[in-house]
Every structure is written in C-alpha cells, then in structure tokens.
Image: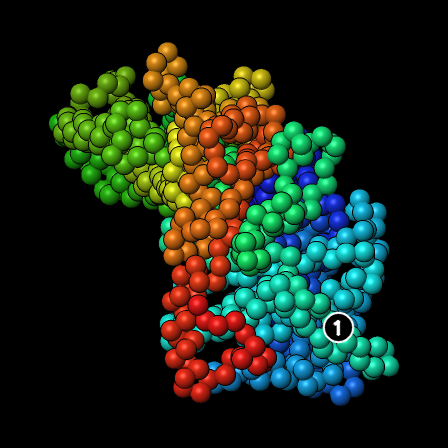
Amino acid sequence: MRELLERYAADYAAAEQMLSGHGDDQSIIHYPTVFLYIGDEAGQAIEPMIQMNAAKWENSAGVIYFHAASTSRSGGSASGSGGQAPAAGATGASAGSYAGGNAGGNGRQAASAAKVTEVVLDGLSTYGSDHKAGRKELWEAFRGNAGYLADLNRALRGVSDTIADYGRLYASFDRLHLAVITRADDPMNALVPDISLLAQAIFQQSFKSVQMDLYTLISEREQMDTFAHASAIGVSFLRELEGMQRQDYTFSALLEVTGDGLAIPVVHPPSPLFDLVYVLSDRNEKGMTAVNGIRDNYDIICHIQLLKNRKRKDAQEGVAYGGYNNSTFKNSLRTESGRQGFVSAGLSKVKRPNYSIALTVLYHLHMQLSELLAKEPELSMREKLACFGLDPASVDAMLTQLLPSEEQLADMTGLLTSGVRYEQLKPLSLRDAEEALFGDGAAVFFHNHFARTAQQRLSEFGAAPEMRRAVAKFERERADISFYQLCAWTEPSGDDGSVLAGVRSRIKELAIAVEQAREELERTQSGRAEDVRIQRLPFMDKQNLRSFIRAFFQLVYGQKWELLRLELELSLYRRLADELEQLHELYRLRVKQMADMADVMKLTALQSIKTADDYIGQNIFEYYARVTADIVLDVQDKRGAGIWFDERYLGSAAELLEQGNEAYVNKLAQLCLKHVLTAEPFAQTFEEELLRRANVTIDYTNRQALAKEDLFKRLYRTLEENASINVRLLDYTHEHRYEEKYMFGDADSEFVQYALGVDETSRIYKLGCIHEKRSSGVEKLNLMGGFHLEDLLYYRNGKVYYETYRENGYAFHGVDPAGLPELR
C-alpha cells in the first residue's frame, strides 16, 4: 500500500512539475546541446537528467545524451538495439543507440523518447579494476586499440547527423553546447581529453563553434576500504585538470578515424581545454551532505546549461532582468597571472510541495468520506431492528415458518382414550386426568408433531442468510447506512441504541416469560378437572367427556403450545444474537480496515512533510484538512449529500474494501486527482498558497498573522540558505571568489520583484532573473567561481593518499607526470 501511495503522489507531483498545459511556460534552449558522459559512474546521471530536462525544456526531445563507458548500463557488454559490430582489430568495442527509459511520473513518455547513444569500450573495465596501475593501463589500452576510436568516431558522427534532424527544434545552429560530465574517482576520466576533443573536432565540422564545459562530480563520502584509493584517483584527475586549463595547454593525437581506417590528428592549440570547469560535490561549503546526495548536482547541471543556452522570448528580457553573460562571468574568474578559476554552484527551490500535498489531501479525503459513512442517521430502534430483519413482524413471520400452527392442536382430540368416564375424572387434577385418559400418548403426540418439528425446523433455519439479505436490502434502500452504523449497532458492549443490546434485552424478557408460562402451565395442570368449564348435560357422560377433552386440549395444550412458542422464540433470538456478533466481527474488520488505511496514509503523509523544508512544509496537514473539508462540503451542496458514494465517484466503499486495500486506495486516488486536486484552492500561486498555509492556525483578525512582506523575507532567506555552494573549500572568502545568483521564475511576480530589490544597493554579487511564466514556485541558482585546486578540501585531504600510493609504486597517469603541474 505504501508503494501505491508513493506512486500516486509521485505521479501527481510529476504532473504538476510538467509545466506545459498548467498555465506555466517551459523554457526553450537556443542552440543544440549534447551531454557527454565519460565513465561508468557518470552514466548514473543520464536517466535523472533526461527526466529533469523533459520537465523543464520544451525542446528537450532534441537533446542528445552520449555515454562512453567500459560496461553497458544494462549490465552487458553490448549496447541496446541498433548496436554495431566492433571495428576490425578491436577487442570488442561496440556502439549503439537506444531510448532512455525508466523515467517516473509524467516524465516517463518524454524521457523514453530521449536520444541516448552508448559506446561500450569492452575490455577497459579490466584495467579499471586494477588498483596498482589500472588508470594508466586503461589510458594505454585505449590509445593502443584502433577499434575503440573507430566506434567512437562512428557513434559521434551519427550523433552529429541526428542533431541535424532536429533543426526545427532550435533557434540557431551556429553553435553547439557540449557538456562533458565525469566522476573524479572514475578511472575512465583519464580519457577525458581524448574523448572530449574528438567529440569537439567532429561537431566542429557541422557547427561554427562548440562551447565545451566540464562538470566534475565529487563524492566525498568515505567508500569503506576503497576510499583512500578513490581519493588518490580523484586527485590524479584534478591534477591533470589543472594542466588542461592552463593557457599553454596543448594536445595532439590521432583521434579521428575515416571509414577506411585512416587516422587524422586532432590538435588543440595553446589554450584551456574547457570553456569553464565546474566542480560539484555531494557536500556543500558548510560541510553538510545534501539530502539527495550527488543527484542534486544533476539538477544543477541542467540549470547551468539552461542559464547559458536559453532562448530569450523577449529581446529586452535579458537587459530588464539581469541575464547571464558567459564571457563576463568567465573573465571574472581569471587572475592577473591568467590562471583560470574553477566554478561551483548551489541550487534551491521554493515551490508548492506537491508530493506531500497529494498524500495529505488523500488522507483527509479518506477521513472526510469515513466521517460521512459513519454519520449516525436518526432511526428508531424499530427501524434499526428492521434493518436486520428483527422487527416484530419479521420475527413473527420466522416463528410461523418454524412452529406448527395452533389450529393443529384440534387433531389431538382424535387420540384414543382409556374408556374412563367423565364422572371418574372430576375429582382428579388435570395432570392426573390426562394420565387417566391418554397415558403418555398426548405428551408424545405433542412432542413429535410440535416440539420436535419446531426444533428440527429451527436447526435447519438459515438465520445468517436471512439476516444478511435483510441488511443488503436495507443498505440498498438507505444510502445513509454503511458498515460503520452496522458495526455500532451490533457492538456486543453497546448501549441502549445497539440492536444487539435490544436483542439481548428481548432475550431477557423472553426468558422471564418462559418461566412465567411454565409456572402458569403448572398451576393449570394442578387444577381439578371439574373446574374446567364445559357445558354439562345430565345423564350424557360420553358427551360431557368429549366436551372435557376438547376444553382440556385448548386449555392445557394451548398453554403448552404458547410455552413452546416462547421457548422457540427465545432459542431463535439467541441464534440471532450469535449471528449479530458474527456480523459485528465482519463490520468491525471493515471499520478497522478503514482505520488501518488511515494510519498508513497519515504516516506516509507526515513522513513526506518531514522531508520537506521546515518552513516550506509548515502547516500542510492543518491547512489541507480545512481545504479538503471545504471541497467535500461544496461538492455535496452542489450535487447532493450522497454524491461521493455514487458510481461516478467512489462507489460502494464496502465492495471496494471486500476487494482489498489496493482497490479502495486506487479508486480513492482517482477520485482525489479528478475531483479534489483540480479544485480552485490548488490553482493558487505558490506565494498565495504558502501565505494562507502560514496563517491557517491563526485567526485572521489576529495582528500576529504573517504579513506578505514577512513571508517574502523568509522565502528569500530560505532560498539563499538552501543554495549553498556544493563544494567544500578551505576558506569561504578565498581571494578570487566571484559570485552571480539567478532566480528562475516569473520576473513579474511580487516575490521575485521583492527578491530582485533586496539589498540592491549594497550587494556585492550580481543578481539576475531567468524569466519563466510560472505560478508553481521559484528556484535560485548560485554560481561561485575563482577558486583553484589548492582551495579544495577534497584535494587537500586526498593529496596525502595520492602521494603515498605513488611512493609505493602505484601509477595513475597515462601522460608523463613530469609534464603535469606541481602539487600545491
């Protein structure tokens, strides 16, 4: 059930995040973009980034994702469909294209359409697993195998052709944005210069320029026994990266391969290899680990790419809102000596917590419907008894089926007598008179034809089916009756309003009546025969005897019949009481089922709220309890009190529960999505929603109610605090620190206008806004650049491992270490 709830909430949140069609804009990227993932570890970013871009970018279908790895992401050595055979002389490199899948929510369809090309360099994983010299040997194996380059060339040229097919999706084909992504601790990053420059060289044949950025992902979590070696690999890559970004960095290698197997050199003239290098860690500058770990950095990469490559819909927009200028930013990171600084970033979001809201509203809707089901109608005890088929008329009808009619007592007058005369009977008691007349014949006859017949019919009588049929009929006729009332009415420890209590009260009455009837029968049988009133005729003893016998049976066996009826009714009620208790267990389990589901829904909702930001998640539970109650009442007012249990809405809760919890939750989720989450309160801007939610526990006449300006201050502070830079530096205020900050949201909204004006005259960083028409929230991207290798705590902490491993004979570099920058 938890999985079902989480899937429902994720689908709703994803649908809300898909801005298109919800009154919000999706952004459009201006130039073609290729994400180049190098290394097996980097491949983990592909699916999340596909989903993020599909949700944010209108033309995301034209984005290419290219992965160079030593093993396939599917676990095999070959790529997906369309894979090509290895080139001649290769040890098994293969290339293929496939659609990225496994996306969640409404991003699934867009993500599955994304173009992902994977080149598996078979055999390299063998070198990467060798701690001693794996990274160096991996580089040498790559350089020494023409098949690897042949497959990379073939696949990259295929990507270039594919981009040309997406021409209608882009505003310009003058430039291509190439984002290279790798992990610092992945041995395959030794190939970053080769693969990056090969991709750049091939793409430059189709585009006037290729802007190439590198995103280096760092995991600072200790990796158990391998953390030291992983840190050493990370430092070795950063040391090489320092050299790649020098002004005098050059590169030349035979990387391009023709269809005939001829090699063509790729030359990089003296200049930094990458336009900008971004270093993103799973720990921020405060030393705190991000909630979503390194996954948050994937979102940062997507935002940076949008910032640098967004199509402006208004020519004046960039000027009006302080747009991003890559050249200005890049120049601000360069020291007087010409040394280029690295860049990092932090991202925070303030938006309606749709995931938590969906779970919270579902819980409150469940509780509202439970209250409607449990509402006690105004019924008399007779009506409640009739619900179970236990009203006096129904019980009399049952007894009529069970007990032979009293008229059949007349048949007893035909019993043979002993020949005794009436005059002889007169002084006798009625018991003795019966003995004198019939012996035990009358008693046996009554037992066989009345008592035993009644008991047999009672044993065969289906009290349970009869009662259940009566309940089902009553439920069909009365929409205000559910298992909640039936459970309360059959409660064994119930009060006077309980049907079971009424039945038990009737049982006590009948038990007393039976005893009284027995006593009355005893008194009657002890009476004298001559006291029985008959018409006595002189000298007609036989006639008088017949009159006595008739009167005797009417009197004595009439009372016996009445006693039998009372005893039978008592036995019947006891059986009915037992059946009511069994029915109560059934109804109790249904009520418990509803309560247990409520507990799971509530716990799931509260746990999701806890994971949200303390401020953004405040009062979700209280606010949406009121919102949901108002919506339920409004729908009832418009469409009738019983509308929620109409087949067009929830339908029969009892029938759904009988099918199981999943059937009920599925139907409830559909109902919530269709009739509740589409209501007006869910169409507010995030500022309005948050302001109302912040004040939900305060009377609106209270002066302490949160003012809009106070809300904006808190929102601004929350955005800034949560956008901490995702890298740990030795000194926050290092010498060359340069910052720019950008809001992603509706620049005309009150909150963004407030944010743009805060500390406008005193701030020491640039603050701009990427205008997107949206009401669902706002995001803030903080860029910080100008730091260098020696400023990174990751580098300083890992350098000792790097040096120790090298001193013990470990080799990390394919290139000559003598040509690398000195360790700082």
Find residue 761 and report its horizontal and vertical position in percent: 49, 28
Who's the residue at 65% across and 43% down the image?
A: 325
Q: Is residue 765 visible?
A: yes
User: Is 232 left or right of 438, judged from the image as shown?
Assistant: right
Residue indicated by mark 1: 266
Compared to 244, does 8 lie above or below?
A: above
Residue at the front extreme, as displayed = 336
The percent position of residue 553, horizontal first and vertical second, equals: 29, 29
| Residue at 37 percent of width and 18 percent of height | 705
Q: Position of residue 593 (x, y in %)?
A: 40, 43
Is the C terminus in the top left, top right, bottom left or bottom right quadrant? Answer: bottom left
> Callout 1: helix, strand or loop?
strand
Image position of 761 with respect to 467: above or below: above
What's the amino acid at mark 1? Val
Total marks shown come to 1
Residue 578: x %, y % from top left: 32, 41
- Res. 321 image quadrant: top right
Q: Say whether residue 64 is left or right of residue 737.
A: right
The reply to whether residue 656 is visible in this rendering is no
- Colour scheme of the rendered structure: rainbow
Dot 1 crowding, Cα within 10 Å, few <14, some 14–19, many 20+:
some
In this view, the residue in front, 672 or 181, is 181
